[in-house]
Each structure stands twice: as structure tokens, then as C-alpha cells.
């Protein structure tokens, strides 16, 4: 498949009914850009525009969380997921569990791996949802000159092998662009690691070098993970990006060294 085959970037009519065939898979390694360093991870999707009809034709709404394992053969193209979810709006289901089970089955088939789906009612979400910042020291106010905004430059990264630390660093300045439409993707990113102390100015300069870069969310996070592993040699590393919402969906990839626990799903202030 080429970028021109994707629903993304093309005018598409809104579906009038549920249709699993709307989901469009993209091979994760199609570009040959997947890192050759071992990692585990998950892509956490939050869907805020989900509704269906009950058996009496009355509309119901909910929020959904999907977790796609990073080792799935396919990732799911975002616009196709949006169109797929739109198809539920005028389709009758027995109850919310039937909707959840249907989505979990369809997404797992398309991803080629078990995908989890969780629905939350609006009332429950209102009680459970609190805005949280990614844990760690924010490096965005460091004073430095920056004049490179793409492509990403791993050689910017450096670490002090004489000082071993266990810390989390956070930046809200990650921005990349959709490889198909060129539209901006904004994110906050957390780098949690143990190992030689990473130069914070170098890390910030490196993250800003994604500013004019074109790659999908998942690919950007994997690139950051791989570059940090190669250039800074931490013994433990996790990279977690919380992207802002587009079309009622936000995508939040997490990549880490094997043995690292999977993250929670904290809603950021920009989400």
C-alpha cells in the first residue's frame, strides 16, 4: 500500500451503518524504519466520539479506550478507525457490551494481535477522569539556541557515563507532521530511564528536531526510543508520548525496554 491508498487525506463519505471493512491496516515494518533494538510497548487510543442505537432506536454514547500491542503486525490507520466508529452511530446493538465485544473482535482481526477495548459511560468518566501531567522534570524552559527543526538528529543526544541516574524527563514541545496530509501532530513526551545521565539541553534540541519531520505517531516514538538506546546506552528506558486529539481520537504510543510495566492512561491538559 502507498500513502495514496489510505483513507487519510482523501474525501470520504460518512458511513451510514456499521462496517468492519472500513478499518484499514498498515504494516508496521512497511517502511523498514522499525528499530533493531528490542522493545515492548502499546498504542493507547482514546475515542471520544462514539455512539450507537439501542434495540428501541434510542441513541447511546460512551468513551472508548483501545490498546493495540506494539508487536502487532499491523497498526490501524487513524481515519479508517474514525470512519469505522462513525458507522456505529446509526446501528442498533443489544447493549454496550455488544458494542465493546464487536469492536474488540474487529480491531484484533485487523491488527493481527489481541486488542483490548474498554467502554466507559459519560457519567462514570466524569467521576474517574482527572487531568494529570506526565511525571518527571520538565525541560522546556532550558535556555538554549535552536536552529534545526528536521530531520531528527540523533547525534544531538549525549550522556555522561560517569554519572548514573534514575529519572524521568518531560517535554511538551514534541511536534511532528502526518506523513500523508502534512498536518501537525502535537504531543507531550516522557523519557524515563536508568543509566548515564542524559544531557537535558541535548535531549530538548533533539526533540525539537522532529518539528518538520513527517512520520506517524508510533514511528516517531520508536525512533526516539531507538536513538536514545543507541546514543545514551541506558540500562532501562521508557518513552511515552501523549498526542493531542484529532477527529475525536488521540493516540498515545509507549515503547520501553523488556520487563517495563505498561503505562496508565492519564488524560493530559491538552487532551
Image (cartoon, helix red, strand yellow):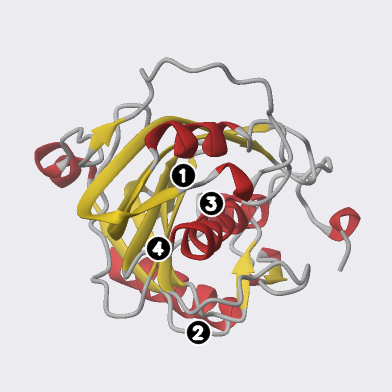
Residue 256, compared with residue 199, is above or below; it is below
The count of marks equals: 4
- Examine the rendered structure and indicate whether residue 141 appears above or below residue 270: above
- Residue 229 x/y as whole percent: 47, 64
Q: Earlier in the sequence, mark 3 or mark 1?
A: 3
Report which residue position mark 3 lands on.
90
Please tell me which of labels 1 and 2 falls first in the chain: 2
Q: Badge 2: few (under 14), some or many (20 or more) residues near its Cα, within 10 Å?
A: some
Does the rendering let one see residue 169?
yes
Tell which circle, 4 or 3, labels the residue nearer the N-terminal end: 4
Q: Circle 2 sits in a helix, a strand or a loop, which is it?
A: loop
Q: Which residue is mark 2?
A: 113
| Front tag of 4 and 3 | 4
The span from disc 3 to disc 1 (Cα, nearest Å) is: 23 Å
**What numbered label is drawn on residue 250?**
1
Tell me which numbered mark, 4 or 1, is placed earlier along the sequence: 4
Q: Nearer the viewer, mark 2 or mark 3?
A: 2
Residue in view at x 53 percent, y 38 percent: 207
- Mark on residue 108? none
Please tell me whether mark 1 sits on a helix, a strand or a loop.
strand
Where, by quadrant of the figure, is residue 166 drawn?
bottom left
Q: Residue at x 47, y 80 (%)?
A: 105
- The image position of residue 251, as x and y in percent, is 48, 50
- What residue is disc 4 on? 66
**Which residue corresponds to the image point at 28% horizontal and 40% vertical from the top-left?**
267
Q: Earlier in the sequence, mark 2 or mark 4?
A: 4
Relative to residue 262, is residue 249 depicted above or below?
A: above
Front residue of 171 and 270: 171
Relative to 27, is 112 above or below? below
Label 4 SS: strand
- Circle nearer the viewer, 3 or 1: 1
Amino acid at each position: 500500500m502507498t500513502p495514496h491508498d489510505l483513507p487519510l487525506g482523501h474525501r470520504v463519505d460518512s458511513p451510514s451503518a456499521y462496517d468492519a471493512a472500513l478499518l484499514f491496516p498498515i504494516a508496521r515494518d512497511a517502511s523498514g524504519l522499525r528499530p533493531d533494538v528490542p522493545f515492548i510497548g502499546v498504542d493507547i487510543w482514546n475515542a471520544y466520539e462514539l455512539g450507537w442505537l439501542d434495540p428501541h432506536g434510542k441513541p447511546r454514547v460512551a468513551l472508548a479506550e483501545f490498546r493495540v500491542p506494539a508487536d502487532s503486525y499491523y497498526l490501524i490507520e487513524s481515519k479508517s478507525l474514525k470512519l469505522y466508529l462513525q458507522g456505529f452511530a446509526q446501528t442498533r446493538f443489544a447493549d454496550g457490551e455488544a458494542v465493546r465485544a464487536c469492536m474488540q473482535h474487529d480491531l484484533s482481526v485487523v491488527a493481527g494481535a489481541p486488542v483490548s477495548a474498554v467502554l466507559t459511560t459519560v457519567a462514570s468518566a466524569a467521576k474517574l477522569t482527572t487531568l494529570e501531567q506526565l511525571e518527571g522534570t520538565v525541560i522546556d524552559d532550558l535556555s538554549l539556541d535552536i536552529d534545526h527543526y528536521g530531520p531528527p538528529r540523533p547525534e544531538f543526544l549525549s550522556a555522561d557515563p560517569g554519572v548514573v541516574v534514575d529519572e524521568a524527563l518531560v517535554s511538551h514541545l514534541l511536534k511532528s507532521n502526518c506523513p500523508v496530509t502534512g498536518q501537525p501532530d502535537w504531543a507531550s513526551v516522557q523519557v524515563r530511564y536508568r543509566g548515564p545521565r542524559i544531557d537535558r539541553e541535548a535531549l530538548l534540541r533533539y526533540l525539537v528536531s522532529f518539528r518538520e519531520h513527517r512520520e506517524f505517531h508510533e514511528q516517531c516514538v520508536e525512533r526516539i526510543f531507538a536513538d536514545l538506546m543507541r546514543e545514551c546506552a541506558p540500562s532501562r528506558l521508557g518513552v511515552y508520548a501523549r498526542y493531542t486529539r484529532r477527529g475525536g481520537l488521540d493516540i498515545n504510543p509507549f515503547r520501553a525496554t523488556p520487563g517495563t510495566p505498561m503505562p496508565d492512561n492519564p488524560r493530559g491538559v491538552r487532551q
